[in-house]
Each structure stands twice: as structure tokens, then as C-alpha cells.
Image: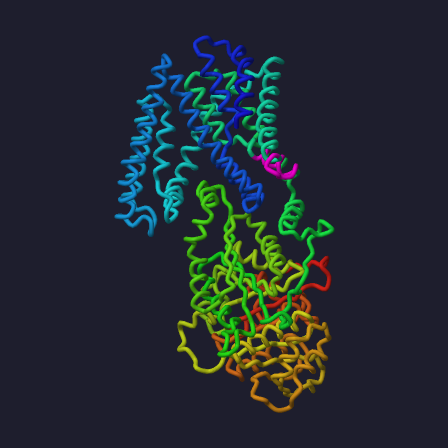
Amino acid sequence: MALPFGLGIAVSVGLYKLQDDPNVPFSSFMLFLGVALAITAFPVLARILAELKLLRTKVGAITMAAGLLNDCTAWVLLALVVALLNSSGGLEALYVFLTTVAFALFLIVFIRPVYRRLCVMTGSFENGPSPFLMTVTLMMVLISAFVTDIIGVHPIFGGFLAGVIVPHEGDLATKITEKTEDMVNIIFLPLYFTLSGLKTQIGLLDTGTVWGYVICVIVVACFGKISGCTLASKACGMTLRESFAIGFLMNCKGLVELIVLNIGHDAGVLNDQIFVIMVVMALITTFMTTPMVMWLYPEWYQKQRAEATRGTLAASLRVSTTGKEPSFHFDKTNGPDRFCMVTMLNRLEVVPSMMSLFRLLHQSPTKGDPGTSVLEIHALRLLELTQRASDVMKIRDQRETQRYDPVLNVIRTFGSLLGIDALHTRLEFLMPSDYIKTLADHGENVQADLILLPWVAERPIPLADDDQLIENASGFPINNDAMTTANAFSIPHLTIGLFIDRGLGLGLDEEPTLSRLQVCVPFCGGQDDRAALLLALRLQVYQNTDLTVMRLLRTLDGAASGISYASQQSIMDTLRDTRDVDDDVFIDTLFTLTSSENTGVRCITLSYSSLEQAVNTVTSECHAIHLGKQDLLIAGRHQPAFSPRTPDVRTLISASDQIQYKELRSVVGPLVYSLLLSDVKASVVVIQAPSASDTEQRSPF
């Protein structure tokens, strides 16, 4: 901060001559220009770091810390400058400054404890700010601004001091901001910018000399901040790219700079012409920050630096997955089998559904056995980064936000009760377009076996016997979360699962059943169906479920039929065998018995000639095994026998329903889509296996 402050003092000599106002002391003008060129807009800086996903990087951490200290120091210096401007002599300026410091101490020592006690009495820490607390807070801000104005500094410092004493426990400061930011953003902020724009007379930039000073101020502002921060970062051992990225980030002026310039203009230290010059400088330095940082510190370089920090720098810049390949096979070579699953929990209402699956996939260790399988869960909470100031505060207090987040708290508590030791939670603020990439990158980094996402829709998927629901439904709209879930199938190199809960997680309208969980797998062939069957076999091993595999063979005469069973040895051999085999070898290796061995795993061979007949056949078998709402149907997304444009599906539902549910059909595939709209009541998991090539892209639409 010292270098840009000094260069600001240097450039103030020429600007003071250009202003030519003897009523303004040069000392005040000099100090004000030094502060204006040294300031960094912390709120804008935090938003830029969040949008560029740099908050968790070394560059982001250093920049946030430096920006916060810079911002606090600049406000203190600005208060001193305003005190000098509003006083007739040095002694009076000292009196104004010391009075301001005394008032700040009074707020911190006496008012803050009283305010905190009021927060406790009203339950604002636990339940958010009460109406009475909001009234007291607004009155405190107005009174504080009034007092600082009487003292001789700008009223904005009073509001700043009132905000300093607000506690941050329980995200109280963020919740107060959420209560007031709509009114501020809709009414006060536009009015402020309108008044600021009316003061900005671009026509005053009418001579070559003035334009020369515009260029000079921009160059000096950029050189001071960028060179000073770059040299300091380089001296601390950072690379040249990281150092320049920090320099350009710290050069961001933003809204804080405009507030400072308006304070100077209102105080009379800046005339209209100098005010315009400084506004142009503030806008240009703010606009150039994001593109320059994206160019200097691109994503591939961030990954390279992260690998270098971990000591695993790859020979090429392209990140490649190593070690255990994502699959559903058992891996017992290095101790207990590890099954890693990544999920995204953006809504509280999907938590019961995912908890039910976590319970099924978790294998409790038996006595004398430390555990044959370890379930590792990575729960991501991806929140939309909006234009609200409260989001910036949540980003700044990200640890506090994650600690009090209700969704992550429920998941952590459930994992602790269930005995899942390897449960990792993560909270990020991102643009919605970055959700899928974040899921893919995280899944690749942790070598996930499955990315399992819940289906989130505005209305539940109706069952065939829910006539009232179908009659009242005006469509099946897909919200942003559902679109994100659907687009997850575009990740080519990882196994993707979509869970559609129809009663597995709740089951409130039925008495709990004492029978074992029924799992059904319609098997038409293809790598997606093989992956779905492997997941079902894992559930059978973990929970001793009854697994029914319906092998569908396309024939014209309907002659294919028969029942075969799997032994415990063939199940374990199939789960341990990682060879990529065709469908016939896969099924014949698994189902080797003609009579039951009490494993609960059987294969029924069925024939069909059309999609409609296949759906009717599967539905009949589901009724035969009494597949209910608290049971599970696991299916592959793509079946070679049924293309996405299979015309037979049109005969199953009306034309209006085709329009209403076309988005769902494009996501889950023709067979699962048809089963969902039949009278099969079970919850559904749709599985998509990794592509044969990393370059192959699968689109859900």
C-alpha cells in the first residue's frame, strides 16, 4: 500500500495545479489522492475471486487477507483526511480525529456488549434477527452516522462503525444484510449511482492536457498497485504468474473507490474536472481486473501449481487420473474395499432420499472383522453466486457458513450416527454453469466410483394410481437444479447415477415392512446395464437384499424364458473381476445355478418384440415380486435395443403427457421413462457407465 500511496502523492502535484483552487490545502489534497490510489475494493475483490474460483487457492487466500487489511487501513486514513478538510488548523483536526476514535471506543466497549445481550434475549443468533433487533440496528446506524457528522467526519463513517460492532456468531451479520439488501439494492444504491452520475461531467475532458492527466493517473494507479504487490509476492516465494495475478487483483477499485471520490467531491477537495478524471481511472482499473487475471492465472496453471505443491507434478499439463479406476468392482488388494461416492445436496428436501441410499450402501463391520468395505462420501453443497452483498459476506466467512449450513449439518449428524467415518462435506459459491465442472473435477480428484445425484423437480413424478395428482398436474417443469442434474450425464469419464425417490426415503403413508429390500434390475445389455447390475450386487452383499434381474431378449416368437440363480462365490467373483466382457459372458458367469442357493439373487429371462411389450413384461414381474414404494429399481440409461427415438413409447402415454414429461424422458432413457409412467411404484436409480473414450461426450438431450 505504501508504493501506490507515495505515487498518489507525487501525481497530486500536477493535479493540484490543474485544479487551481487555493481554498483547498495542498496537504489535504495530497493525502486524499494518496488514499484514493492506494485503496482496494474488498467486496468487489471477493466477488471476482469467487467467480474465478480462486478462493481456495494460495492466490485467493493471500489476496483476501491483503485486501481486508488494505481496506481497513484506507478507511482510517480517509477519516483522518476528512478531519483535516473540515478543520481550520492542525489542533482542531487532531481534536476531530481523537473525538472520532473516542466515539469508536465507546461503541466497542459499551454499546457492543449491550447489543450482544439484546441478540441473546431475542434469540437472534439461533433464529435470525427479530423485528425488534432490526429496529434497534437501523436506529443505531442512523444515530451513529448523525454523531460522526456532528463530530466533523462524514456520516458514512458512523454507519461503518455501527456495522463493526455487530456480532458474527450464527451468521447474524449476514442475516441482517439479507434483511436490508433488497431495499438497498432496489432503492438506495440506484439513487446513489444516479447522483454520482449527475456529478460526473464527461464534457470536462475537453483538452489534450486533461486527457494526458487521465492517462497519467491510470498508468500511475496501475503501476503503483501492480508493481508493489507483484514485488512483495515475488519476495515471498510466489511464481511470476501468481505475483502478477495478485497485483492485478489488488488493483481493483470498484464501488469503494466511487464512494471515496464522492466523499472527496462533497467535502470540496475535488472539483468536477478532477472528479471525472478519478472516476475514469476507477472504472478502467476495475474493468481490467477479471480479464487480466484470467489470462495471467488460467485454470491449467492453477492445476499445475496444485500438483507441484502436492509433489506430484505430471510430465504434461493435462491432468490424468491414476491409481484405482472408478468402477463398482471390489478392490481388496490394499485392505478393505473402498467405495467412493460424490453427491450434490443443494436442497434440504432431497436429504432424506440420499440418506436412505447412504444407509443401503454402508456396510457395518461385523464382529472380528474390521470391515470389508469402506464407504467414502463427498457431499458437495454448491450454492449459486448471486449479485447480493450477503453472498460476499458468506464467502468471506465460509467456515462459519459451512458450520451453520442446515443441509451439511444434517448429513454430518446422520453419517456420525450411521458410523460413516469417511464423510467429507464441502460448500462452494459458484455460477450455475460451473456446477457440472466442479462435480467432474472433484470426482476425478478423489477417484470417485460413482457420482450420485438426486432428481429435483417442482412436482413429484406421478404414479399410475395417483389419478388426482395427474389430473391436477399442469406439467412437469424442470428447475435449475434438475437441469444441473440432467447435464451431469455429459461427464464422460465417470460413472453417473440419478436417484428418483418415490418413497424409499420417506414411506410415511405405509407401515414399515419387515421383509427384505427388493431390488429389480431390467437388463437389456450394454455397459450401462452392466454397471447397474454391479451396483445392485453391491447392495445385495451389503444389505442381503432380494435381487431380481430381468434379462430382456428381443425375439419375434417369444420363446426365450427360464430362471437361473447366482451363488455367493459367483457374486464375489463378478464383483472382483474387472475385465470388460460382453453381456452373455457377464450373465453366464454370474448366474451359474439352476436352483436357489439362498443368496436371493436370481435371473429371469424374458422375451419381447417391442418397447411396449418390454415395459408390460417388466411391470408384470415387478407386481409378481411385490415391488413397492420402499423398494428399488436400478437400470442403465442407454440400452442398445432402445434408441432415444424409439417410436413405441408414444403408444404408452397421451400426446399431452409426452410434452409434459419430455424432459424426463430425454434424461433417463426410453425404458426407464416408460416404467416411471407405468404402475411400477419403486424408487429408481439410473446408471450411466463411463465412456469407452475420454473424448466421447454423452449429452442427455
- Number of labels in the image equals 0
Query: Is there any visible trace of residue 606 in the rendered image?
Result: no
* Near-viewer residue (468 or 600): 600
Q: Main secondary structure of the magenta part?
A: helix
In this rendering, the answer to whether 267 lies above or below 620 is above
In this rendering, the answer to whether 103 lies above or below 86 is below
Snapshot quadrant of residue 469 = bottom left
Query: Is there any visible trace of residue 147 in the rendered image?
Result: yes
Q: Is residue 436 left or right of residue 173?
A: right
In this rendering, the answer to whether 629 lies above or below 399 is below
Q: Work out which quarter of the rendered image holds the C terminus and state it.
A: bottom right
Q: Residue at horizontal 65%, vertical 88%?
A: 593
Q: Residue at horizontal 37%, vertical 36%?
A: 164
The picture places residue 433, in percent across and down from the top left corner, at 58, 49
Q: Is residue 640 left or right of residue 125?
A: right
The picture places residue 369, in percent across and down from the top left corner, at 52, 77
The picture places residue 645, in percent across and down from the top left corner, at 67, 66
* Near-viewer residue (49 or 98): 98
In the image as oriented, which residue stretches furthest toward the bottom?
595
The picture places residue 394, in percent across and down from the top left corner, at 45, 45
Region of the chain picked out in magenta, as a range: 235-249
**Residue 323 included in the magenta stretch of the image:** no
Q: Is residue 264 left or right of residue 12?
A: left
**Residue 248 included in the magenta stretch of the image:** yes
Q: Residue at horizontal 34%, vertical 20%?
A: 96
Snapshot quadrant of residue 8 = top right
* Near-viewer residue (530 or 652): 530
